[in-house]
Amino acid sequence: MTYAIVEIGGGQIRVEPGRFYDINLLAADPDSSYTIDKVLLVSNDDDITVGRPFIEGATVEGTVMRHRRGKKVIVYKMQPKKKTRKKRGHRQELTRLMIDSISLNGSVVAKAEAEVTTAE
């Protein structure tokens, strides 16, 4: 199994080709390609490459599927016996990113498998 650990959207996530991930909002249009060059680790079967801090020449290609908003988080603060109450909500702006391929030194290490459709 091939995967990579990348730094994107203020955090580090483990990504695999053919899967989508919800990350903090990116400045990219939907249906456009997005390249991540901050790759920390690439694991290709038993071969593991670790960067210091990033791997030179490693990239992860992805496609922006859409922008969305996350679940609402309620923050409720109350001080007992003081009649003070604050109720606030927050919804995080997210981008859904589909990972297409993982490249290492210009060669594609892993690529998402194309979906096979049959016409009836």
Image (tube, grey):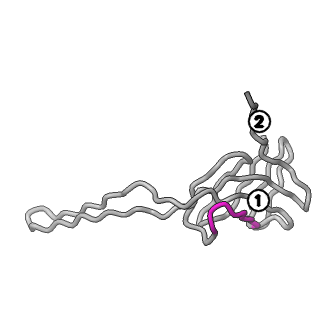
- The answer to if 57 sits in the magenta stretch is no
Q: In the image, what residue occupies the spot 79% across and 42% down?
A: 113
Q: Quadrant of residue 92?
A: bottom left
Q: What's the magenta region?
A: 29-37
Q: Amino acid at mark 1?
A: Glu
Q: Position of residue 102 (x, y in %)?
A: 80, 54
The numbered disc on residue 61 is 1
Q: Position of residue 59 (x, y in %)?
A: 80, 62
Q: Quadrant of residue 31?
A: bottom right
Q: Amino acid at mark 2?
A: Val
Classify residue 106 as left or right of residue 70. right
Q: Callout 2 environment at 10 Å: few (<14), some (14 to 19), or many (20+)?
A: few
Mark sitting earlier along the chain (1/2): 1
Classify residue 27 as left or right of residue 50. left
Q: In the image, what residue occupies the spot 83% across and 50% down?
A: 48
Q: Position of residue 24 (x, y in %)?
A: 55, 64
Q: Quadrant of the N terminus?
A: top right
Q: Callout 1 environment at 10 Å: few (<14), some (14 to 19), or many (20+)?
A: some
Residue underneath mark 2: 116
Q: Quadrant of residue 75?
A: bottom left
- The answer to if 35 sits in the magenta stretch is yes
Q: In the image, what residue occupies the spot 61% across and 72% down?
A: 27
Element class at badge 2: loop
Classify residue 64 as left or right of residue 52. left
Q: Which is nearer the eye, 109 or 40?
A: 109
